[in-house]
């Protein structure tokens, strides 16, 4: 069964600190993996998208890594800011059909305290 | 910033009422999608469209219906709302298939049925 599991479910850190969010997936055959940021009451916004051949991609203070062999990804946030408080969602797509499917994780709720 | 808009942002209605959630995009995307999201849970695809006069049901069974008469417009309708329909509804669009292309989300419509 294709699944996307994220950990931790929630995380609280102090402003200025770094943190790493995890995503494990069982989706096969793999097409790409995305990380989205979703502020409370808003729609998700794309941070990064990585294909099989990419193992690192950065977007400002956000750096995503992908290990396609172990089917794991991480999102590292450097020098956190209060505005980083949000839910971070890992999404994996397959290429097993002409339709293609997206599999969503439940997200990690990050809270940054001053 | 994505040019995709949803109205209303918040709606509280009584059981049995008919409601329509509006979604419009100005990016000229052929592909549009409706997702349902409950707190702390993953997004579930309920409807999608690959172009004008093309609509399909998604993975999650839904009593809602959609139409695609114009490229830019993809409204979702509930003929008779029930408390079980209380949820966040997210509209999205993409130039290519969602599994390969960038997916842009609207801000969401939070529906509460009393």
Image (spheres, coloured by chain):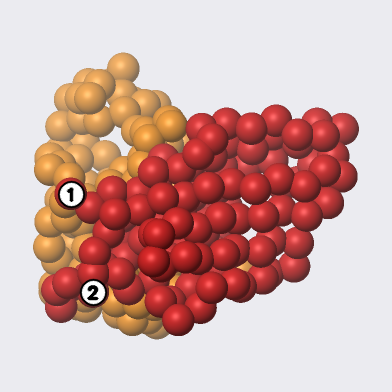
Label 2, on which residue?
Answer: A95
Q: Is residue B114 above or below residue B37?
A: above
Residue at far front of view: A69
Which chain contains the residue that carries disc 1?
A: A
Q: Is residue B89 visible?
A: no
Tell which of A89 and B5 is nearer to you.
Answer: A89
Q: Residue at x 51, y 78 (%)?
A: A54
Q: Nearer the viewer, mark 2 or mark 1?
A: 1
Is B56 left, or right, of B34 in this rendering? left
- Chain in red, by letter, is A
Residue at far top of view: B114
Which chain contains the residue that carries disc 2?
A: A
Q: Position of residue A66 (x, y in %)?
A: 50, 66
In the rendered structure, the colour chosen for chain B is orange
Label 1, on which residue?
Answer: A1
Label 1: how many Cα within 10 Å (few below 14, some 14–19, many 20+): few
Identify the disc placed on residue A57.
Answer: none
Q: Position of residue A74 (x, y in %)?
A: 56, 55
Q: Residue at x 43, y 32 (%)?
A: B40
Q: Is residue B38 visible?
A: yes
Would you identify the image quadrant in which residue B110 lies? top left
Q: Are the residues flagged by discs 2 and 1 from a single subunit? A: yes
Label 2 vs 1, first from the N-terminus: 1
Kind of element beneath mark 1? loop
Kind of element beneath mark 2? loop
């Amino acid at each position: 069964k294709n699944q996307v599991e994220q950990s931790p479910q929630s995380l609280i850190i102090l402003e200025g600190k770094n943190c790493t969010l995890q995503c494990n997936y069982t989706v096969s055959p793999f097409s790409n993996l995305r990380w989205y940021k979703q502020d409370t009451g808003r729609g998700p916004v794309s941070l990064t998208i990585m294909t099989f051949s990419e193992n690192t991609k950065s977007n400002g203070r956000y750096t995503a890594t992908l290990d396609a062999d172990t089917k794991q990804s991480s999102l590292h946030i450097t020098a956190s800011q209060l505005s980083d408080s949000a839910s971070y969602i890992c999404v994996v797509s397959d290429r097993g059909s002409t339709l293609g499917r997206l599999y969503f994780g439940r997200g990690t709720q990050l809270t940054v305290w001053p | 910033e994505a040019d995709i808009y949803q109205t209303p942002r918040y709606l509280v209605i009584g059981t049995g009422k008919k409601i329509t959630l509006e979604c419009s995009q100005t990016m000229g995307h052929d592909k549009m999608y409706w997702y349902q999201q409950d707190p702390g849970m993953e997004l579930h695809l309920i409807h999608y469209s690959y172009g004008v006069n093309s609509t399909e049901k998604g993975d999650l069974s839904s009593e809602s219906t959609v139409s695609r008469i114009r490229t830019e417009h993809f409204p979702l309708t509930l003929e008779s709302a029930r408390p079980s329909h209380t949820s966040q509804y997210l509209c999205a669009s993409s130039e290519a298939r969602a599994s390969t292309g960038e997916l842009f989300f609207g801000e969401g419509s939070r529906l509460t049925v009393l």
